[in-house]
Amino acid sequence: KDHRPDLKQVVVGMILDNEGYPLCAEIWPGDTADVSTLLPVAERLKKRFQIGNICIVADLGMVSRETRNKLVEMNWRYLLGAKMRRENEVRDHVLADDKPFLEISGERQKSKDPSPLKVKDVFVEGRRYVVCKNEEEARKDRHDREAIVESLSKALKRGDKSLVGNRGYRRYLKGAKDSFSIDQSRVEEDERYDGKWVLTTNLDLSASEVALKYKQLLMVESIFRATKTLLETRPVYHKCDETIRGHIWCSFLALLLRKELQDSLETARKENEERLQWAEILDDLEMLTESEIEVGDKRYVLRSESKPGAVKAFAACGLRLPPQMRRL
């Protein structure tokens, strides 16, 4: 959805397996709420693919309290993001737990190392929560807050009342008539959330497995970004329902081919070989062309110079590039 009220919108949902392979896609009208699609889609998938047990893994925007209650009633497994600031139980009890964290991965030594992660289990009246913390993100959150508070303090000395309209500033302000000051209690309250996120689940997995499973949602987000930008799913210029579906279905097939090529490239890639970005590979393939020429009564086909991305893509698929010149 592009936040364009002047244009009609569609919502696209996609189903991926654990390895990131696209299995199927569905389309809804643009005014369809995410929370209203989750359970009906899961029910259809369960029947379509004959799934015995199902576990819903979803972020905060996909699940309402009613949806979560329904999951419990249906006896389905779930792993859901919890709203730390809005849910009283999470804010007042789960985050107040003082048990030590278990470190899963420490500080990064190289850029490709997994991000730091600590986890711990917290139970409230039989309900299980998993608190996760990333020290890298905690430092960033602390730095950002300190910068905001410092900037706010300087602006207040100048008597700048326009700060009230700034959401970043307003969260740390308290006012009395026409005067404003920094609310230190809000600053301290905000520190509790630095680098943390909270999950709720009824799975039997360990806390570390729960956190790593939830982080697979990042893979889903990455694939959707590729679909919308790299594969140019949007904008859609069609007007009929059938042609719009066809356009999105072609993007879905392209995504499947991209996954196959990605896995082939990973298999063929040597340890020390530089990894090419997808944009580079597509650009190099786009530049691969053939031209037909005539010299007297003879006809030839000339191939353009091959770039590294095109060469690797062909090799990963077990194909040989045609010669640079061949006679017809």
Image: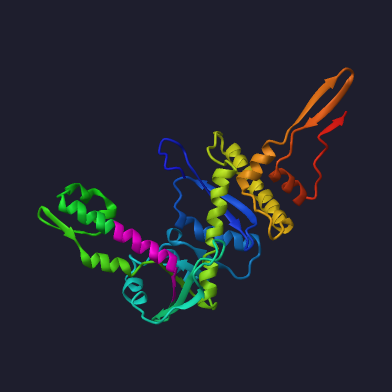
- Residue furthest out toward the left: 177
Left or right, 185 with respect to 311, comes to: left
Q: Is residue 74 above or below residue 37?
A: below
User: What residue is shown at x 68% (from left), y 59% (from top)?
Assistant: 272
Which quadrant would residue 85 be assigned to in this image?
bottom left
* Residue 254 shows in the view: yes
Which quadrant would residue 311 be assigned to in this image?
top right
Q: Nearer the viewer, residue 252 or 96?
A: 96
Quadrant location of the C terminus? top right
User: Which contiguous range is marked in magenta?
Assistant: 129-147
Which quadrant would residue 196 be assigned to in this image?
bottom left
Q: Is residue 19 above or below residue 292?
A: below
* Residue 13 shows in the view: no
- Counting the numbered discs, the total is 0
Colour style of the rendered protein structure? rainbow
User: What residue is shown at x 43% (from left), y 70% (from top)?
Assistant: 133
Whether 133 is among the magenta residues is: yes
Residue 69: where, in percent of width, then height?
A: 43, 69
Residue 124: where, in percent of width, then height?
A: 38, 79
- Residue furthest out toward the right: 297
Residue 61: where, in percent of width, then height?
A: 43, 58
Whether 100 is among the magenta residues is: no
Q: Is residue 202 above or below residue 27?
A: below
Residue 29: where, in percent of width, then height?
A: 49, 45
Left or right, 297 with respect to 67, comes to: right
Q: Nearer the viewer, residue 127 or 289?
A: 289
Q: Nearer the viewer, residue 292 or 217?
A: 292
State whether the magenta stretch is mostly helix, strand or loop: helix
User: What residue is shown at x 20% (from left), y 51% (from top)?
Assistant: 155
